Structure formats: structure tokens, C-alpha cells
Amino acid sequence: MTASGTLKVAAHSDREIKITRSFNAPRQLVWDAHTKPELLKKWLFGPDGWSLAVCNIDLRVGGRFRYVWRNQGGHEMAMGGEYREIKPPEKIVSTEEFDDPWYPGVGVGTLVLTEKDGKTTLTQTVQYESKEARDAVLKSPMEQGLAMGYDRLDKLVTTQAGR
């Protein structure tokens, strides 16, 4: 298990990764930052120097999302998926599939937000089609990109919360 700030990323089972991060802001603000394109564009996970050029969200069961990141050199990375379960402001279950896959198959992510004393804990579990896919993700620079994005999210929601 590794950590950056309060970010923790660890193997959770043979096919899953568990990601946790806490934020000094109410759950509704963290939820909105995950579900409103105008807010996602301000922080969405990824390394510094990348922007979210496309952010489409149809937030309903069976609806789809699409993200396209672009770096300063014009290189793009894109992914999308389908929403399988939505329980505002607590839970989202969705698939994830990259246009140019760097791991085999489709991932299924479950995002859960819990609030205690005005602070929110984000727990995301991603299940992959195989142990090999999970291991490929764990060996990638995904954690560093997540850490940078979640640091941006922390600034955004802390500012919104007036803290």
C-alpha cells in the first residue's frame, strides 16, 4: 500500500484496487465535483499539465460518460463508460474503458462518499477482468495522476466549503 497525502491505493482482492482519500468538505460538494462537468474540468484526476478537453455526463442508470484529456503537446487520452447505479450523493457504479487501452478488458468502479463531522471520505473500488489487468494498473503511474487530481479536488471543495 502506498500513500500520497491522504490518498491510499492498494490491491483489495485478486481483481480489485481500493482507493481512499479524505476531503475537508461536505459530501455534497465532493459529489458535485464528480458529477458536474464544469467542476470536473477544474480537477479531474490526471497528471499536472493535462486538461479535460471533453467532459460529457449523462448521469442516469444506463447513461454514459466520456472524458478526453489533452496535454500541452496535444496528446490525448480518452475513456468512457456507462452508469450502472446512482444513489446521490453517496454512490456511483460505472464501467470504464479507455479508447487506447493500457490494460485488458473493462473496469467496473464503485465510488462511495461518506461524511462525518463535515469531512468526506471517498472510497473507490475498481474491479478488473483479471489479476493481470489489476497488476498492470498498480504498476502504472495511475497513483501519481490520482494524487495530483485529488489534490486539485481538495483545493476546489475546501475553497467552496469556505475552509
Image: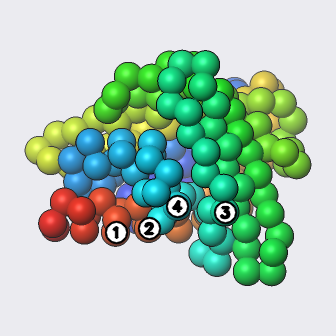
Nearer the observer, disc 1 or disc 3? 3
The amino acid beneath tag 2 is Arg
Q: Is residue 122 visible?
A: yes
- Seen in the image, is 117 located left or right of residue 108? left
Residue at 73 percent across and 68 percent down: it is: 70
Q: Which quarter of the picture shows residue 86?
A: top left
Question: Which is nearer the eye, 61 or 15?
Answer: 61
Q: Is residue 16 visible?
A: no
Cα distance in 3D space between marks 1 and 2: 5 Å
User: Which residue position holds label 1?
Assistant: 155
For the image, the number of numbered tags is 4
User: Which residue position holds label 2?
Assistant: 152
Residue at 28 percent across and 49 percent down: it is: 29
In the rendered image of this protein, does residue 157 appear above or below residue 84? below
| Coloration mode | rainbow
SS label for mark 2? helix
Q: Are marks 1 and 2 in contact (CB under 8 Å)?
A: yes
SS label for mark 3? strand
Cα distance in 3D space between marks 4 and 1: 14 Å
Q: Quadrant of the C terminus?
A: bottom left
